Image: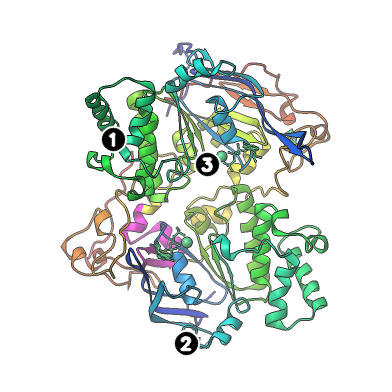
Amino acid sequence: MADVQPGTEAKAQAPLVKVRDLKMYFPIHSGLFRTHTGNIKAVDGISFDIMPGETLGLVGESGCGKSTVGRAILRLYDLTGGTVEINGFEIAHVDRDSLRSKRPMMQMIFQDPQASLNPRMTVASIIGEPLDEHMKLTANERLARIYELMDWVGLNREFAKRYPHEFSGGQRQRIGIARALALNPKFIVCDEPIAALDVSIQAQVVNLLEELQNRLNLTYLFISHDLSMVRHIADRVAVMYLGRIVEIASREKLFAEPLHPYTQALLSAVPEPDPESERNRRPIVLQGDVPSPANPPKGCNFSTRCPKVMDVCRQIEPGVYDFGEGRQVACHLYSESMTTTAEPTAGERTN
Amino acid sequence: MPDTAMPILDVKGLETVFRTRGGDVHAVNSVDFHLRPGELLGVVGESGSGKSVTMMSLLRLLPSPPAEMRNGTVMFDGQDLLKISPEELRQVRGSRIGFIFQDPMTSLNPVYTVGFQLAEPLRAHLGMSKAEARARSVELLRLVGIPDPEQRLKDYPHQFSGGMRQRVMIAIALACDPKVLIADEPTTALDVTIQAQIIELVKDLRQKLGMAIIWITHDLGVIAGIADRVMVMYAGQVVEEGPVNEIFRDPQHPYTQALLKTVPAVRGPRAEKLQVIEGQPPIMHEAPDACSFRNRCKFAFDRCAEENPALAPVHMPGHRAACFLLDKASTKEPEAVHG
Ligand SMILES: Nc1ncnc2c1ncn2[C@@H]1O[C@H](COP(=O)(O)OP(=O)(O)OP(=O)(O)O)[C@@H](O)[C@H]1O
Ligand SMILES: Nc1ncnc2c1ncn2[C@@H]1O[C@H](COP(=O)(O)OP(=O)(O)OP(=O)(O)O)[C@@H](O)[C@H]1O
Ligand code: SF4
Ligand SMILES: [Mg+2]
Ligand SMILES: [Mg+2]
């Protein structure tokens, strides 16, 4: 377990991923003439860093904007606002051509291995496709690379000529991972990579992602609603609620002592496979439903459900308070003890 | 509740086969279990292990073909549900046994208002008048925590959020005050904060109404929090069954032991590496004639490939497991290896 040791001066490292004030709005069109009547504020001004080799977990309720963050920072959308820097390149506002040359370094692994693989392509052609698009390889080099990738993810080379439907869910996810690794990426967005898999298979895939990270020095944004898995794999964790990050902290700090009322409720709601501790657990049960991102509440986004809500929360949006060591919380409860911050600090390195 | 109480539901030798073009699938293989009045039985097991098909089979909800029910008795209130007439069965389903099914096709109907869908079983099964059914519907929605119930009766399912729809489903399942409620993955599609609301609701309803519940889930945490007893399924069979504390503290079947280790914790110490169960569950083209878990089992030995172990009592009363290791004197796995 890596606590920061006083005295051992950690060398200042530049973040691999640097996101500032990211905004992604989807327009709402309605009426006869499909006029633009409003916006779904799926992501509404978020900032964070991810250090090289680090895994940042991104958690939060369904619809809070996690996938939109992942897709936006890979520029699968044209951003509404903000900047995104990956490996020193600003990619939020560059044109298609320069974006294309940056594609290899950033990849994505999707939730549903079934839907993300072309059913009419063999495993070899699925894994080889990005190689054909971005590299000039001879047939032999290409095949050698495909075999290497299959070895990395633990797929038998004999399966190269098979089609996706001939595989189990866990094996299909391995195919998706091999494809994502084809171009030697530095940064991978894993969007719910294990959600569609069975419990006994989830652990296989998570262990594989960890092994590959160590071997290839990969940096991950790991999106998941499974908090116990995030606690396992992430070095730092960002908690989202309705388009905003409400708390970001190292894994140890966040799980040991959540500070934002939403993080507290979220963690307290997770049941533990232990009947005795379950008997005594009193979850903070939130009332009501998540508001629509088309019409977020005034003030703090969480104010309609927050058990600790104060008058100010319904009027004024809370600032982001810095607790040091990369921990930040957006909540009025801390307005007296803390000062606001402008820059997200990179987290302490935990391994 | 006393362990000796007569079961309200007693299932023996249930066997269901799907006859498909790709070959037979032996989805449920000689399943035995029981449910006592007022108790909550948790059912776990991986995808495809036969949890849903078992419950659909005992209510005779599977279309035939492709399903073929080859064997079994399902005693409920002194009647064998597999023998009674379709008319008698309809009376049982939806009035004395309520269910919430995983399959969205069998859940709420998008073209009818929630009020209509609540009133329908009340009028059909209990012969209530329109006004009575309406009053009871309001009461049910209030019971499951839906604000403004009079107004919401007029709404269609899509006007409710996911968590509220699940509450409505629970209200419909409870409409006729069933003795048994079968809930198949009722919270799997919901966020944890909404899941917590539903679980608190069900705990509360159990206290108020005292029905017996079968709750299917793949989430061991949920089971730990609500079940009195747990039944673990693998490849269409019950491989272990027992009181919740024992299943979690002292699992006897190697599959249960392995399953409990694959789940990382949110509280307490954090493991550096996740334990895995290597391999895949079997494709069940034939009825099992050996232990179905043997290809993934760390302890498999010759006998496991020769015969299929039966569910047999292990040291504590009410705890049963199907594994040949238990015939040997020392059954326990050596201390778990960490790291
Ligand atoms: N292409 C789109 N057009 C319009 N609205 C969208 C689009 N994509 C997402 N949204 C909306 O933006 C919000 C955030 O969606 P997003 O998919 O990012 O959530 P999420 O946190 O990934 O949820 P989940 O856990 O369910 O995957 C939602 O309200 C969603 O309906
Ligand atoms: N209509 C069908 N035709 C053929 N096979 C079927 C059919 N329905 C279910 N099966 C098979 O029966 C087996 C048991 O399925 P069942 O739905 O009971 O699993 P489960 O334990 O409920 O899994 P899950 O956790 O995914 O819901 C599976 O192998 C499944 O593929
Ligand atoms: S700012 Fe107020 S409403 Fe928002 S989380 Fe903090 S206490 Fe709750
Ligand atoms: Mg998503
Ligand atoms: Mg099922």
- Contact? badges 3 and 2 (CB < 8 Å): no
Residue B121 shown left or right of residue A128 in the figure = right
- Give the alpha-carbon distance from disc 1 to disc 2, as whole Å: 53 Å
Q: Secondary structure at mark 1?
A: helix
Q: Position of residue A103 (x, y in %)?
A: 46, 22
- Give the alpha-carbon distance from disc 3 to disc 2, as whole Å: 46 Å
Dot 1 amino acid type: Met
Q: Quadrant of residue A27?
A: top right
Name which residue lies at 30% across and 31% down. A149
- Contact? badges 1 and 2 (CB < 8 Å): no
Q: Chain of mark 2?
A: B
User: Quarter holding the C terminus of chain A?
Assistant: top left
Tag nearer the camera, 3 or 2? 2
Q: Position of residue A2 (x, y in %)?
A: 43, 26
User: By what rule are the colours in the image chosen?
Assistant: rainbow
Q: Quadrant of residue A76?
A: top right
Name which residue lies at 58% across and 54% down. A280
Dot 2 amino acid type: Lys
Residue at the limit of the structure toward the left, as seen here: B302
Residue at the limit of the structure toward the front, as seen here: A33
Q: Chain of mark 1?
A: A
Please state the extent of the stretch shown in magenta in the rendering.
B233-258
Q: Which residue is mark 1?
A: A150
Q: Residues within 10 Å of mark 1 (few under 14, many from 20)?
A: many
Q: Which residue is mark 2?
A: B83
Q: Which residue is mark 3?
A: A227
**Does any atom of ligand 1 lie closer than 8 Å to the CB of label 3?**
no
